[in-house]
Image (cartoon, rainbow, N blue to C red):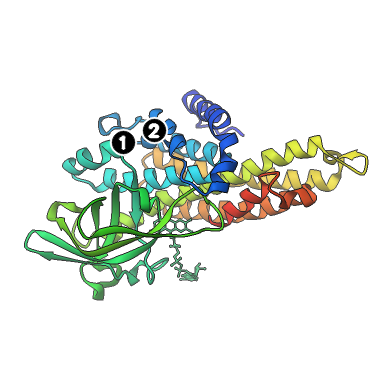
Amino acid sequence: MKLAEFTDKHNAFRKEIREFAKSELLEESTQIDRKGEFPWHIINKIKERGWLGVPFPREYGGLGLDTTSYILLIEEIARVCASTAIMIAAHVSLACQPIYANGTEEQKKKYLVPLARGEKIGSFGLTEPNAGSDAGGTETTATLVADTWIINGTKRFITDGHVADVIVFTASQDRSKKVHGISAFIVEKGTKGYEPGKEEEKMGLRGSITSELHFEDCELPRENLLGKEYGGFKVFMETLDGGRISIGVLALGIAQGALDYSVVYAQQNILKGKPLHKYQWVQKIIADAATEIAAARHLIYHGAMLKDRGEKSITKEGAMAKLYASEISTRVCAKLQSIFGEDGITRKFPLERFLIDTKLM
Ligand SMILES: Cc1cc2nc3c(=O)[nH]c(=O)nc-3n(C[C@H](O)[C@H](O)[C@H](O)COP(=O)(O)OP(=O)(O)OC[C@H]3O[C@@H](n4cnc5c(N)ncnc54)[C@H](O)[C@@H]3O)c2cc1C
């Protein structure tokens, strides 16, 4: 599918990622899922290509490309391995981005440069046992004593949490102010009083890491505040605008991956003496899937391109893209699975993996 704003550079970048995904990731993706192991060796190859810093300027360790290029990266990787794609998405859009958008020059040099170069891994901690969709329930506290922040609390469901070297997180300076009492901070692995906690055993995205983070009288220097005091709501709302597009494109990549396999399967398999793709019910499932995927792709690329155009807010576009793409992806994967008959529920084919992974979007 072509969009008018796509440049030759975008198309060339997509081709490069697609070739990488095919040669380096396709065969590995099943093992990553089965073993449930973080794919370090793949991440190292991705890092060597500079893809952990795609949308950030070169002076901050990035590749100096745009949001659309970053979206293409996540789509092409998710098409083959969603566990690897979510690892990159959390690192780029949830950890690097808020530092790029809100960090001081010193913070960008100290944290963003090694993150964008892939020398360090980043994550973002907002969710807590009692704070999810409504971050006003944030119970992690930050108290300024002289020039030191004292942090106490627990985060959960944090992507890359266990392996992250640099974590952007939220804590409340004044719980009575709900979301307006929240500030954002940066903590580094190894800081006294900070420990990643238990890892979730998930039904899908089994090669990705999702874990708790614990803060117990964790002491952070005053300069580890990210943005302004009580400015955490703005930091995470803007971060989530980009994060929603990232999750949307992950869902899109998974749906496209499922469609790719289904078309090949329908071409290569026979049902009652007739090739599967000759059946009208199979053609209908494939046509519906391709149409819904194209519609989701339009919403997502539109959001990314608005961002590249310098649009101030893409809150609505990001939310719509995530909502639509995640819903069609679940529906599309389930419908495509029926083309495979019993094979669809076996592990001979990756359809079961796509269906389960996309449920987490
Ligand atoms: C794979 C994965 C990776 C994640 N990675 C991260 C990460 O890196 N960092 C991070 O901070 N978090 C992360 N999360 C957490 C995620 O952001 C939260 O799960 C999400 O914010 C929802 O919060 P919750 O789970 O507490 O659910 P809740 O907010 O408690 O919602 C529970 C249910 O109630 C519904 N609901 C909530 N509010 C309303 C409302 N006002 N009206 C109607 N219905 C409502 C929800 O739709 C949902 O069905 C991750 C989650 C998953 C699954």
Mark 2 surroundings: few (<14), some (14-19) or many (≥20) residues within 10 A: some
Above or below: residue 320 compared with residue 252 = below
Q: Earlier in the sequence, mark 2 or mark 1?
A: 2
Q: Position of residue 163 (x, y in %)?
A: 36, 48
Q: Quadrant of residue 225?
A: bottom left
Residue at 13 percent across and 55 percent down: it is 222
Q: Position of residue 223 (x, y in %)?
A: 14, 51
Q: Residue furthest left?
A: 146
The numbered dot on residue 47 is 2
Q: Position of residue 174 (x, y in %)?
A: 21, 71
Helix, strand or loop status at disc 1: loop
Q: Do we see residue 70 in this rendering?
A: yes
For the N terminus, the image quarter is: top right
Q: Nearer the viewer, residue 263 or 47?
A: 47
The amino acid type of the residue labelled 1 equals Glu
Q: Quadrant of residue 140?
A: bottom left
In three-dimensional space, the C-alpha distance between marks 2 and 1, rounded to whole angstroms, equals 8 Å
Q: Is mark 1 within 8 Å of ligand 1?
A: no
Residue at 50 percent across and 32 percent down: it is 5
Helix, strand or loop status at disc 2: helix
Residue at 71 percent across and 44 percent down: it is 348
The numbered dot on residue 119 is 1
Above or below: residue 96 compared with residue 229 = above
Q: Residue furthest bottom?
A: 176
Marks 2,1: beta carbons within 8 A: yes
